[in-house]
Image (tube, rainbow, N blue to C red):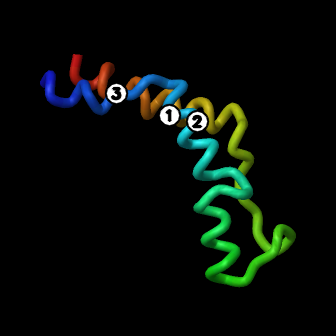
Amino acid sequence: MALVLPMAMPAYVLAYVYTDFLQYVGPVQSTLRETFGWSRADYWFPDVRSLGGACLMFSLVLYPYAVYS
């Protein structure tokens, strides 16, 4: 049970990583644009800084505490 607790990261660390990877100039969208030759108007990507994104991050951060406590 205690071995899963290191999976629980502080929310601010995960939020920085999440926004860095998924923003327009981040590696995820840059790779999609380079791979498929898309421009900004060719695809839709959900807004990284939103209520849904915040709920997802809190769920990922607090999951180990809720399940293994």
The residue sitting at 70% across, 74% down in the picture is 33
- Quick check: 3 left or right of 23? left
Q: Amino acid at mark 3?
A: Ala
- In the image, 26 versus 68, the foreground residue is 26
Q: Nearer the viewer, mark 2 or mark 3?
A: 2
Question: Of marks 3 and 1, which one's residue comes earlier in the chain?
Answer: 3
Of pointers 2 and 3, the one earlier in the residue sequence: 3
Give the image quarter of residue 2.
top left
* Residue 45: x %, y % from top left: 72, 58
Q: Residue at x 24, y 25 (%)?
A: 5
Q: Nearer the viewer, residue 2 or 34?
A: 34
Q: For residue 51, what is the image quadrant? A: top right
Element type at mark 1 = helix
Q: Residue at x 76, y 63 (%)?
A: 44
User: Is disc 2 surrounded by few (<14), some (14 to 19) or many (20+) residues within 10 Å?
Assistant: few
Find numbered disc 2 in the image and state the secondary structure of the residue it sits on: helix
Residue type, numbered disc 2: Tyr
Q: Residue furthest top?
A: 69
- The amino acid type found where label 1 is placed reads Leu
Above or below residue 67? Residue 24 is: below
Q: Residue 4 in the image: x percent, y percent?
A: 21, 30
Residue bearing mark 2: 16
Residue shown at 30% from the left, 32% from the top: 7
Drawn side of residue 8 relative to residue 10, left or right = left
The quadrant of the rendering that contains the N terminus is top left
Vertical order, 40 against 57 (above or below):
below
Residues marked 2 and 1 touching at CB (< 8 Å): yes
Q: Which residue is mark 3?
A: 8
Q: How dense is the environment of label 1, judged by Cα within 10 Å: few (below 14), some, or many (20 and up)?
A: some
Q: Disc 1 marks which residue?
A: 14
Q: Secondary structure at mark 3?
A: loop
**Mark 3 residue crowding within 10 angstroms, few (<14) / some (14–19) / many (20+):** some
